[in-house]
Amino acid sequence: MAQPVISGEKLAGQTEQQGGVDRPPNRPTTSLLEEARKAVHDFLGKEPNVRDVRVTKLAQIDAQEGTWEAEADVYVPNETIRTLGLPVRKEVLERKSYLLRLNRQLQIVAYGSVAAVEAAVRSRPDSD
């Protein structure tokens, strides 16, 4: 049974003070989240013909190791329309989704399209 908190006291190890705000232990700070998001954005933004990058998911998967996992959508011109030279009033963009892993130094250590990662997972034999 959980111990009651009496008169606003905190249980030992329940929260920690960070920047004047109580946070659960081992929870990354906002600035660290922003740095990880920026690392993903900058990495994918260097790809050719990228018009926009949106980080849709970001999570620290191992606090001890400092590793992160991110999902991001990259918007690039539609190759079919571009190749055929079809006249359009606005540029038609297509969305490509990527899954990325970052290390403690927020360097990209692995990435691939979400579709390719899902296909690889589906093709693995069950280890039951």
Image (tube, helix red, strand yellow):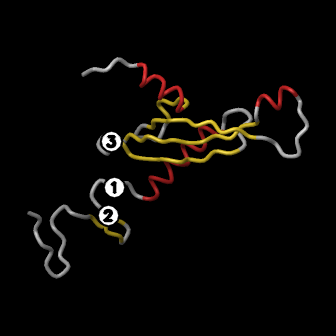
In the foreground, 107 or 74: 74
The reply to whether the C-beta atoms of the residues labelled 1 and 2 are less than 8 Å apart is yes
Residue bearing the label numbered 2: 23
Image quadrant occupied by the C terminus: top left
Q: Using the numbered discs, state the Cα–Cα distance from disc 3 to disc 2 in whole angstroms.
A: 17 Å
Q: Within 10 angstroms of label 2, few (less than 14), some, or many (20 or more) residues?
A: some
Q: Which amino acid does label 3 sit on?
A: Asp
Q: What residue type is labelled 2?
A: Arg
Say which quarter of the image contains residue 121: top left
Residue at screen point 65% across, 39% down: 95
Residue bearing the label numbered 1: 27
Q: Which amino acid does label 1 sit on?
A: Arg
Q: Using the numbered discs, state the Cα–Cα distance from disc 1 to disc 3 in whole angstroms.
A: 11 Å
Judged left or right of residue 58, residue 113 is right
Earlier-in-chain disc, 1 versus 3: 1
Q: Position of residue 2 (x, y in %)?
A: 11, 65
Farthest residue to the right: give it.
87
Which structural element holds mark 2? strand
Residue at screen point 27% across, 57% down: 25
Q: Position of residue 10 (x, y in %)?
A: 19, 71
Say which quarter of the image contains residue 13: bottom left
Residue bearing the label numbered 3: 62
Q: Position of residue 85 (x, y in %)?
A: 89, 30
In the foreground, 52 or 2: 2
Judged left or right of residue 88, residue 4 is left
